[in-house]
């Protein structure tokens, strides 16, 4: 891998790579390791957008966003997921439910408290998995994601 070949780490290598790319109008997807303040801020400053996963690498930010989304869902009442996907492969069936929450109200708070720029959308994906030959769901996991893309992008598309 490029980062390892140069003796650096993956985050620094990704940031260096992003500095070489014209990000204006581009959407960059980031796994949990690369969803970092320096990376998302660079993307926004260069005119791009990001979609990234929040896990244990940013516990205070993840907790704040998770609590805020919970409040937003409670205010809206119980609602169905915005999207549902089914997948079958590798000997299992997977159902993914995706909820989106407009984060414009949260943008200033996240910038001022955590130093993150451009937050406009939060969401979570709940995954249920079952072996193809099974009768019960084996697992249930939830992943939080953040994006600088506005909620309207998802409503249109």
Image: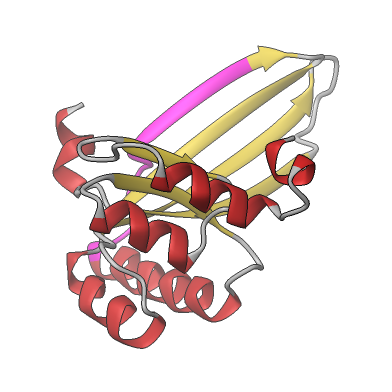
Magenta highlight on residue 112: no
Q: Position of residue 58 (x, y in %)?
A: 58, 72
Identify the residue shown where x is 69% and y is 46%. 140
User: In the rendered view, how is the structure colored?
Assistant: secondary structure
In the image, taking residue 59 as reference, residue 106 lies left or right, namely: left
Query: Is residue 33 in view?
Result: no
In the image, taking residue 52 as reference, residue 4 lies left or right, namely: right
Identify the residue shown where x is 67% and y is 50%. 10
Locate the N terminus and report the quarter of the image it occupies. top right
The residue lying toward the viewer, choosing from 156 and 119, is: 119
The residue most toward the right is 133
Identify the residue shown where x is 18% and y is 72%. 105
The quadrant in which residue 77 appears is bottom left
Q: Position of residue 28 (x, y in %)?
A: 40, 39
The residue lying toward the viewer, choosing from 16 and 111, is: 16
Locate the C terminus and report the quarter of the image it occupies. top left
The residue lying toward the viewer, choosing from 113 and 97, is: 113
Q: Position of residue 81 (x, y in %)?
A: 38, 41
Q: Position of residue 7 (x, y in %)?
A: 78, 52
The quadrant in which residue 3 appears is top right
Identify the residue shown where x is 14% and y is 42%. 152
Query: Is residue 112 in view?
Result: yes
The residue most toward the front is 6
Magenta highlight on residue 81: yes
Q: Which residues are magenta?
A: 76-87
């Amino acid at each position: 891998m490029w980062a390892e070949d140069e003796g650096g780490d993956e985050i620094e290598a990704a940031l260096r790579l992003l500095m070489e790319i014209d990000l204006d109008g581009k959407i960059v997807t980031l796994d949990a390791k690369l969803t970092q303040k320096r990376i998302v801020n660079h993307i926004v400053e260069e005119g791009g957008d990001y979609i990234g996963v929040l896990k244990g690498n940013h516990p205070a930010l993840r907790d704040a966003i998770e609590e805020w989304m919970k409040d937003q869902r409670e205010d809206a009442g119980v609602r169905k997921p915005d999207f549902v996907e089914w997948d079958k492969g590798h000997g299992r069936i997977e159902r993914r439910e995706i909820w989106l929450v407009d984060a414009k109200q949260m943008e200033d708070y996240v910038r001022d408290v955590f130093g993150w720029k451009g937050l406009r959308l939060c969401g979570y994906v709940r995954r249920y998995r079952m072996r193809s030959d099974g009768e019960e769901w084996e697992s249930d996991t939830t992943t939080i994601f953040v994006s600088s893309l506005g909620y309207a992008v998802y409503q249109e598309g």
